[in-house]
């Protein structure tokens, strides 16, 4: 097989029968050899694979997809700070109450078992903590 | 892209409308299903929107965007053991209305399965050059290979498809 025909065969095997998909530099080769006996056989073999591939046609993208993308890109971020501030405030309040209770019981001469029970463990739990 | 980097939503809309069609076509043929393809294309565009300020105009946007889509396809393959096969959206769950539609759907499934069986880079080469009709230089740039290596990928991929076609006849 001469070099031109070899290159023709390589292009057909890689790019298919249609010269539209061939490298630009090799398209004149397609024009020269396509109608020769050997060229016709080579292109016919390549065309069988082309026809197989052509069966799978892609449907156009739905217009709704573009809108979905735009909505996802431009939707505002959730208000994280506000939520965090609410949790921080609540945690501070709870800590303040417990802190007050613990501090109050410590400054008394006798532990205020009743106050501790109400805030922390409930009356039933007093024996468990030695009171 | 400069306008998109400034947060220009109208510019981003134009970008999406210009590239979403071929993007879905490319990804669908890579991963084998329309729903997955749409999700991946959406992810790719969100990355464009969020990363537009960092985009360097060293290459065409389309070449760069192909690369983003291709990388997402690779991540998708790694996350899923086998390409997902989806029911044709146009086919109802009930019996097909005509035998011709059933035969056509089966033919598409065979092509889809044959392409899905190719190694990723051969698959990408065929999808880019045959279906997307990218030039050799653009396809090679996208795959980060030489044009000679691209041609080799195409030859091997098409040879594998030919064997697949012939095995069905026997």
Image (cartoon, coloured by chain):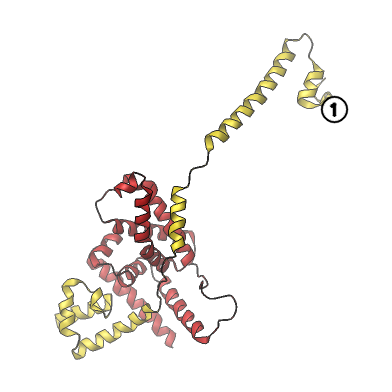
Instruction: State which chain disc 1 sits on.
Output: A
Can residue B75 be seen by looking at this rendering? no
Hue of chain A?
yellow
Pinpoint residue B34: horizontal percent, then vertical percent: 46, 67
> Is residue B133 rendered to the left or right of residue A27?
right
Q: Nearer the viewer, residue B29 or B148?
A: B29
Question: The C terminus of chain B appears in which quarter of the rendering?
Answer: bottom left
B67, above or below A10, in the image: above
For the point 39% across and 51% down, which residue is it? B47
Disc 1 packing (10 Å; few <14; some 14–19; many ≥20)? few
Pinpoint residue A109: horizontal percent, then vertical percent: 77, 8
Q: Nearer the viewer, residue A37 or B14?
A: B14
Pinpoint residue A77: horizontal percent, then vertical percent: 49, 42
Q: Nearer the viewer, residue B139 or B61?
A: B61
- Pointer 1: what residue? A124
B61, above or below B131, in the image: above
Instruction: Tell which residue pokes out farthest to the top in this image.
Output: A109
Q: Nearer the viewer, residue A50 or A5?
A: A50
Instruction: Tell which residue pokes out farthest to the front in this image.
Output: B10
Say which quarter of the image contains residue A92. top right
> Is residue B148 rendered to the left or right of residue B71?
left
A111, above or below B83, in the image: above
A31, above or below B16, in the image: below
For the point 76% across and 10% down, which residue is it? A108
For the point 28% across and 64% down, which residue is it? B139
Provide the letter of the chain coloured red: B
Element on which disc 1 rests: helix
Pinpoint residue A53: horizontal percent, then vertical percent: 37, 77
Say which quarter of the image contains residue B38. bottom left
């Amino acid at each position: 097989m001469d070099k031109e025909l070899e290159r023709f065969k390589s292009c057909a095997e890689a790019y298919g029968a249609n010269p539209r998909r061939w490298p630009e530099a090799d398209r004149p080769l397609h024009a020269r050899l396509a109608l020769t006996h050997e060229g016709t056989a080579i292109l016919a073999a390549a065309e069988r694979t082309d026809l197989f591939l052509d069966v799978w046609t892609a449907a156009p993208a739905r217009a709704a997809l573009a809108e979905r993308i735009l909505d996802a890109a431009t939707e505002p971020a959730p208000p994280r700070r506000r939520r965090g501030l609410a949790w921080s405030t609540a945690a501070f309040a709870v800590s303040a109450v417990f802190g007050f209770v613990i501090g109050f019981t410590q400054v008394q001469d006798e532990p205020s078992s009743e106050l501790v029970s109400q805030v922390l463990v409930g009356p039933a739990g007093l024996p468990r903590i030695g009171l | 892209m400069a306008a998109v980097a400034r947060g220009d939503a109208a510019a981003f809309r134009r970008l999406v409308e210009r590239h979403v069609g071929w993007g879905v076509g490319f990804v669908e043929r890579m991963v084998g299903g329309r729903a997955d393809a749409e999700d991946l294309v959406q992810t790719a565009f969100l990355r464009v929107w969020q990363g537009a300020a960092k985009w360097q105009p060293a290459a065409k946007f389309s070449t760069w965007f192909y690369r983003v889509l291709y990388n997402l396809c690779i991540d998708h393959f790694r996350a899923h053991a086998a390409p997902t096969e989806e029911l044709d959206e146009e086919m109802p769950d009930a019996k097909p209305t005509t035998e011709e539609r059933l035969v056509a759907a089966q033919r598409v499934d065979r092509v889809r399965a044959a392409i899905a069986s190719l190694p990723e880079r051969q698959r990408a080469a065929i999808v880019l050059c045959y279906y997307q009709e990218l030039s050799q230089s653009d396809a090679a740039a996208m795959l980060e290979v030489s044009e000679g290596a691209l041609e080799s990928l195409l030859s091997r991929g098409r040879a594998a498809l030919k064997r697949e076609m012939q095995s069905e006849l026997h």
